[in-house]
Amino acid sequence: MNLSIRVLGKSVVTELEARTNAPVLRIGADAFTRHDLSVVKCFNFVAATNLSRILNSELQVKNTRDVFDNVNPTALVLPRLGAVSLAVLGAAFESKRLGGDAPLESWVIKHRAKDATREFVTFDSLKHKYHRDVEAAAKERRAIKRRKSARRDQAHSLRVERHFKRAENGQTV
């Protein structure tokens, strides 16, 4: 891209060049620029930034090979991570030449459970299962809270009733 200093100004050109050369995806020690990802036809830079944040802060991986070898795909079923971010991870695998011609499939096969009944489960299916599990847990917490509240209210009613009975019988309160 030809960035004209005379038209855009030096500060704008400097900022654009810095942004172009800055890593947009960082997986542990590995850094990928926009150019690195565009070579493998990946242009989802917002998803790359989100993936970087999750892999480095929550999973604390060493590098891209560490993700490929040690991180199970189900570990990435997180609220702020979607299928597009997974596609970016596949582009990172491809850029590092991990997993052959189909890096995402190789990664999933590598971490598939021995007793798995299906060859592949889509990431969307995994996310839906995760959300169903989270919703079921929330529903159970609400039910426990409701039962606890009902028991508390019933116990209070019994105490109040006993208090009034004692008061009617002239017993000291």
Image (cartoon, rainbow, N blue to C red):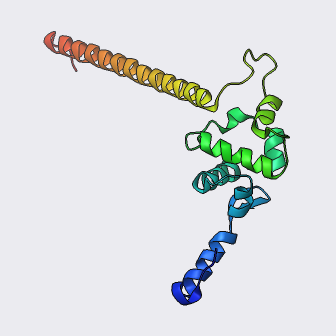
Snapshot quadrant of residue 149: top left
* Residue at (63% x, 35% y) in the render: 77
Identify whether 115 is placed above or below 31: above
In percent of width and height, residue 86 lies at: 66, 42
Asked if residue 61 can be seen in this view, the reply is no
Number of marks present in the image shown: 0
| Quadrant of the frame with the N terminus | bottom right
Residue 54 % position (x, y): 64, 49
Q: Is residue 93 above or below residue 26?
A: above
Residue 151 appears left or right of 68 = left
Left or right: where does residue 134 sit relative to residue 123? left
The single residue placed furthest to the front in the displayed view is: 2
Q: Nearer the viewer, residue 3 or 28?
A: 3
Q: 23 or 7: nearer the eye?
A: 7
Q: Quadrant of residue 139?
A: top left
Occupied quadrant, residue 107? top right
Task: Write the residue at 55% across / 81% down.
Answer: 12
Above or below for 116 versus 16: above
Q: Is residue 29 left or right of residue 80?
A: right
Front residue of 137 and 118: 118
Residue 47 in the image: x percent, y percent?
Answer: 60, 51
